[in-house]
Image (tube, coloured by chain):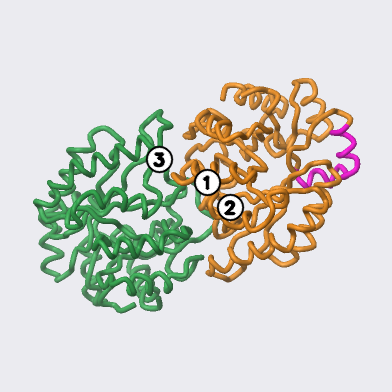
Chain colours: A green, B orange
Amino acid sequence: MNRDRFSINQMTVKQLPLPKLVEECVRLGVPGIGLWRDPVKEYGIEATARLVRDAGLAVTTLCRGGFFTTDGWEADNRAAIDEAAALGTDTLVLVSGGLPAGSRDLPGARARIADAVGALAPYAGERGVRLAIEPLHPMYASDRCAISTLDQALDIAERFPAEQVGVTVDTYHLWWDENAPAAVERAAAGGRIHSFQLADWTTPLPEGVLDGRGQLGTGAIDLTWWAELLERVGHTGPVEVELFNDALWARDGVEVLEETLAAFLKV
Amino acid sequence: MNRDRFSINQMTVKQLPLPKLVEECVRLGVPGIGLWRDPVKEYGIEATARLVRDAGLAVTTLCRGGFFTTDGWEADNRAAIDEAAALGTDTLVLVSGGLPAGSRDLPGARARIADAVGALAPYAGERGVRLAIEPLHPMYASDRCAISTLDQALDIAERFPAEQVGVTVDTYHLWWDENAPAAVERAAAGGRIHSFQLADWTTPLPEGVLDGRGQLGTGAIDLTWWAELLERVGHTGPVEVELFNDALWARDGVEVLEETLAAFLKV
């Protein structure tokens, strides 16, 4: 893929302070960046917005809103929408949350998530922010995200205008699903692919299964096939690389950024 | 559920030597047992068959055949079918295997699995052994089983007579899938539920995600809902409890067996 479509998700190189990350993006000709709320708040929202704007970087997404099955979700998500608008990104990624504490009612959790998205959609739309529901791998269904497939995400998103609610397509979460390619076409036909993220699948999975997303090209996913699929359905926007990986985090951040860009160019 | 439907999968209490396990099953009125090939071979196939027969235990399954994407699968699976017949069980559970070494072709792996099942089905049928394709949770798609949903398992099984090929329904692998309940009905309508297994979903998942299957009632799955679903579709056969769990394996096996039976009766 071409460099002009590359966006580095901040989490991939979280060891880099924001100004250093921005500086290195400029040096390497990286045009986009996906930001996370916590480090952005630490640096300051206005300061971050200025920093990336002055550097000419596009903020491709803000990660993340969601966790709709825990108390306080509404105020927190309205704040996230405001932050996205302030940062100049049009996309807020949603990780929807798992089962409420003590519950075993998965359909109930999914209904609650749909209701929450409905409560937020107009507010997001007014601020020019699109909500991008991210289906997470089914191994997160109980504790992080009850939305496990792209079709489930679309079943919710399609209740609302596409400029308010769409989906995040992340290869790490969807690669195993034989129905995902058709769902990608469905999403594209509705103009709902608001974010496309790449990560590779490597095993063995680490304890807790959070921080084992593989560098592009090191795992089981045919990423070129996925990139071609997204291109075929007309997705020409930025492509974020979002890796959670203890081994990468332990290394020099600039080196990891360079390596990630090189791996992206090879897809 | 009633005791007369309970079957203890040998792996749940693998710390118990086979004669001790059989003795405790008799003492507790446990009517069925699911066996694993390796410990059975260690004890001797004929000796095992005699031991369980003399104790009046039903062998509900033999685990496992499969791994069709690695070399040598055919001879190994024919041997597994022979062993199942010798042990007097009518069901061989199949864990189909993941991607071949170095491959990223998931549809190709699935096609290979379907071909392998087709090559084995008549041989199994002649020996009175039903193959039970087990969809494994998508987190195993790359390294253990490319068949990730019950519908995928049925898409293969339905090419062959039900007395040759069916499926294993295991709550641990299917609980997250909103399409699984309809697939259970589909499987039942075709007479293809050859094994029903229970395990609960607990987090955090351990490294490698193999040995973290929760004791019944300790996790996220509404097991009663699943038991009722299976009853509703007419499955009245044995129900195996198969837990892979380091914490349970570290404890006294008899205590774990008693606890597992008690948990089963509460479902």
Of badges 3 and 2, the one in the foreground is: 2
Q: Which residue matches tag 3?
A: A143
Which contiguous range is marked in magenta?
B36-53
For disc 3, the neighbor class at 10 Å (few under 14, some 14 to 19, many from 20) is some
Residue A120 makes an appearance in the image: yes
Q: Which mark is residue A53?
A: none
Amino acid carrying label 3: it is Asp
- Determine contact: label 1, label 2, CB under 8 Å: yes
Residue A63 makes an appearance in the image: no
Amino acid carrying label 2: it is Leu
Give the CA distance from mark 3 to mark 2. 29 Å
Q: Tell which subunit mark 3 falls on.
A: A
Q: Residue at x 26, y 76 (%)?
A: A28
Q: Which residue matches tag 1?
A: B183
Quadrant (top left/top right/bottom left/bottom right) for the N terminus of chain B: top right
Q: Is residue B41 magenta?
A: yes
A232 horizontally vs A246: left or right: left
Same subunit: marks 3 and 2: no
Q: Is residue B33 above or below residue A165?
A: above
Q: Tell which subunit mark 2 falls on.
A: B
Q: Residue at x 54, y 57 (%)?
A: B141
Amino acid carrying label 1: it is Ala
Q: In the rendering, at what x and y percent does residue B96 appear? A: 64, 56
Q: Which residue matches tag 2?
A: B154
For disc 2, the neighbor class at 10 Å (few under 14, some 14 to 19, many from 20) is many
